Image (tube, rainbow, N blue to C red):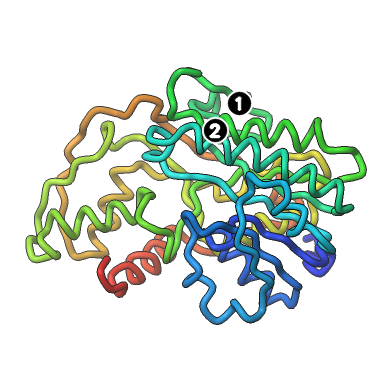
Amino acid sequence: MPHLNINSLGKVLVTGGTGFLGSALVKRLVDEGLEIRVLDNNSRGNLERMNGYMSQIDFIEGDVTSLDCFMEACENINTVFHLAAINGTENFYRVPAQVLGVGVKGALNSLDAAVECGITNYIVTSSSEVYQEPSHLPTTEKERIIIPDIHNPRFSYSAGKIINEALAIHYAPEALRTIICRPHNFFGPDMGKGHVIPQFILRMKELSNDFTNKKIDFPVQGTGSETRSFCFISDGVESILVASVNGESREIYHCGTGNEIPIAELAITIAKMLNLEINIIPSEQSLGGTKRRCPSIDKIRNIGYDPKVSMNEGLKSTVDWYLSTENF
């Protein structure tokens, strides 16, 4: 298996470094002994995620839509991890202009600053959202990427990611090594409340009256047979680092696992961990929702990635964290 020489990244800038993925990546890099700078406006991130690490990082509070902020942040940096984005389906519908603004301006500014400052490596985290309804499963990196309905604000996020990918491949000069990572549903403790797993935990708590009612009806979008592939955050960070260090420039790598789980099974598994019995109630699928999504990770396995954490182990850790968190 190829060696993972993380020190080859040099001094690192992480945009969106106080977010769920960003903070996990920053802490891993600090633990590896690297010098880290973070650029974030904390609009969605949380500095509390960096407790115990703030004294070990250079933190710049700023916005990725400002080229001046990027120029300052990129000074004396070797590697840029561009993670900053406005995520969350509610935001795609509510503020699509901001979602696209951060996605597109952030992409251009990050690349322009990287070139101007002589950055060596540029790593962008894209998204499995770029596929929408994939034509085959497990989906390889060769799958076509589409925007099914340009009028649907749901696709403001994936449109920004597609543009960032295109810029990393075609706009960046050849001298700048660029890597595209497509994460697939990273999850874990402290991931906020805007994603399916914490939403399920919270809704089960509410519907069961703080877990006092042991049998509850539980509505889900669609039939419950819709599938996703989830990846625990520590494996997610590892996959991004493997792609960043061992990957080829201008190449795309799936970051996640190849394990597909129906949403109904996910809900039932979480319920069992909460000592609940649930009756799945199907409802209308949201417009733009995808029936199945599962990546092939053969390409990234070939350069040294091997996920370690099982779905059940990751879910147990996540459920326990949310249950122990005050005011959840």
- Residue 242 spot, x, y in % from top left: 72, 57
- In the depicted view, which residue is nearer to us: 281 or 177? 177
- In the depicted view, which residue is nearer to us: 293 or 199? 199
State whether residue 298 appears in this view. no
Other-residue count near label 1 (Cα within 10 Å), few / some / many at <14 / 14–19 / ≥20: some
At mark 1, the secondary structure is loop
When the figure is inspected, residue 67 is found, relative to residue 22, above or below; the finding is above
Q: Quadrant of residue 188?
A: bottom left
- In the depicted view, which residue is nearer to us: 297 or 164? 164
> Looking at the rendering, in which quadrant would you find the N terminus?
bottom right
Which mark sits nearer the N-terminus, 1 or 2?
Answer: 1
At mark 2, the secondary structure is helix
**Residue at image location 69% in from the left, 51% down from the top:** 301
In space, the residues marked 1 and 2 are separated at their CA atoms by 9 Å
- Identify the amino acid type marked 2: Ser
**Residue at image location 70% in from the left, 66% down from the top:** 37
Q: Is residue 9 left or right of residue 271?
A: right
Determine contact: label 1, label 2, CB under 8 Å.
Answer: yes
State whether residue 220 appears in this view. yes
Q: Which mark is residue 145?
A: 1
Q: Which mark is residue 158?
A: 2
- Residue 289 spot, x, y in % from top left: 39, 30
When the figure is inspected, residue 231 is found, relative to residue 142, above or below; the finding is below
- Identify the amino acid type marked 1: Ile
Q: Residue farthest to the front?
A: 68
